[in-house]
Image (tube, grey):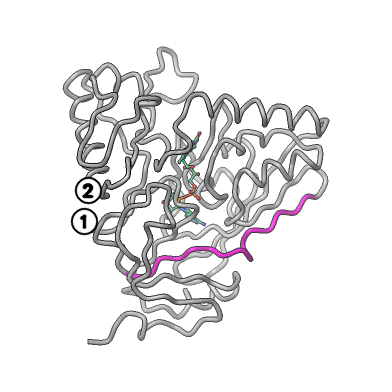
Amino acid sequence: MTSLIDRLPRVRGKLLAAEPLAPATWFRVGGPAEVLFLPKDVADLAAFLATLPEDVPVTVLGAGSNVIVRDGGVQGVVVRLTASFGSIAIDANTVRAGAAALDARVSMAAARAGLGGLEFFSGVPGAIGGALRMNAGCYGVETKDVVTRIRALDRRGRSVELTAADMGYGYRSSSAPADLIFVEAMFEARFDEVSAVVQRIDDLKARREASQPIREKTGGSTFANPDPPGAPHQRRAWELIDAAGMRGARRGGAEVSRQHCNFLINTGDATAADLEGLGEDVRAAVMAKSGVDLRWEIKRIGVG
Ligand SMILES: Cc1cc2nc3c(=O)[nH]c(=O)nc-3n(C[C@H](O)[C@H](O)[C@H](O)COP(=O)(O)OP(=O)(O)OC[C@H]3O[C@@H](n4cnc5c(N)ncnc54)[C@H](O)[C@@H]3O)c2cc1C
């Protein structure tokens, strides 16, 4: 039987068969990509998508801070954007960032240029592509509040320009077509004193350090809050999980964080099935206790 890699278009970047994905995610679990594609640049990615057989599924992985890769790995091609997608450029109060740029680097680059408004990015351990897809945010600011334009490629490699309105943003979600691979975005920041912006970033980091298990193998908030920020009587996922008695619950090597009970942790030898199964235990417990059907914020990809 012809293997997938033999059916794929020639590229200038790298195509790797049966490449482990666990090291590319924060949870450090899961099986391999059938083929991992590391495109050299946007043109390489566009040409690849344009001639890729239509039946081959494509999955994008960013910094892997919001995903569980299932134990059977991911069928088809997994795309990981390389360093050439990670540039950051500043023009007046506009910050242009490639989708592989880490959010924290974008935040610091803006700060050094005397631009505020992107401090919240310093608390999100992902890359810009993931932030665009997830509407990442913290402490009251979300990606949707600062992004102005997005450039993407569709499944056929055609360039697509979007505005923030086109992204269909909701709380930690976007209804932009699932096949889009974001390659670059522009953000509007505001002029400010460098020292003031850096101070706010430091404060934010200290706050997170105290409240979240950021040094663990985790995926951040497991479930979206049922109500958006600012809603009257906002129900928070962690409160519902706590009320259901699930703080510290375990399944195999997976644990509900005692520090922040909306975080799942791989304590060392968890499988993806342990983590996902524990997440489902939490959902069932919350449903039984408070009748709320928690929505997974963490993306689960691949086969079990
Ligand atoms: C310790 C910790 C703390 C966290 N705190 C926060 C927080 O405060 N606020 C918050 O919002 N999130 C938080 N997260 C979750 C996570 O960092 C964000 O969701 C982040 O935006 C995910 O980015 P990523 O690059 O890691 O994406 P990944 O986890 O790799 O992928 C997430 C999704 O984005 C898609 N995606 C990634 N790149 C692209 C691209 N270029 N084009 C199209 N789709 C793409 C993937 O296909 C997947 O569906 C936290 C995570 C951790 C581990």
Q: Quadrant of residue 291?
A: top left
Residue 73 in the image: state x and y as whole percent.
29, 62
Is 268 above or below relative to 31?
above
Between residue 208 and residue 81, name the one nearer to us. 208
Q: Which span of residues is magenta-colored?
A: 76-90
Q: Residue at x 41, y 55 (%)?
A: 178
Instruction: Please check the rendered image and state whether residue 79 is part of the magenta-colored stretch, yes or no.
Output: yes
Q: Amino acid at mark 1?
A: Gly
- Mark 2 vs mark 1: in front: 2
Q: Which residue matches tag 1? A: 304
Distance between mark 2 and mark 1 Cα atoms = 7 Å
Instruction: Identify the residue shown where x is 36% and y is 36%.
Output: 222
Q: How many marks?
A: 2
Magenta highlight on residue 82: yes
**Tag 2 residue:** 273
Check disc 1 and report its element: helix, strand or loop.
loop
Q: Is residue 122 left or right of residue 292?
A: right
193 sits to left or right of 8 = right
Of callouts 2 and 1, the N-terminal one: 2
Residue at image location 35% in from the left, 25% down from the top: 258
Instruction: Give the farthest residue toward the front.
Output: 268
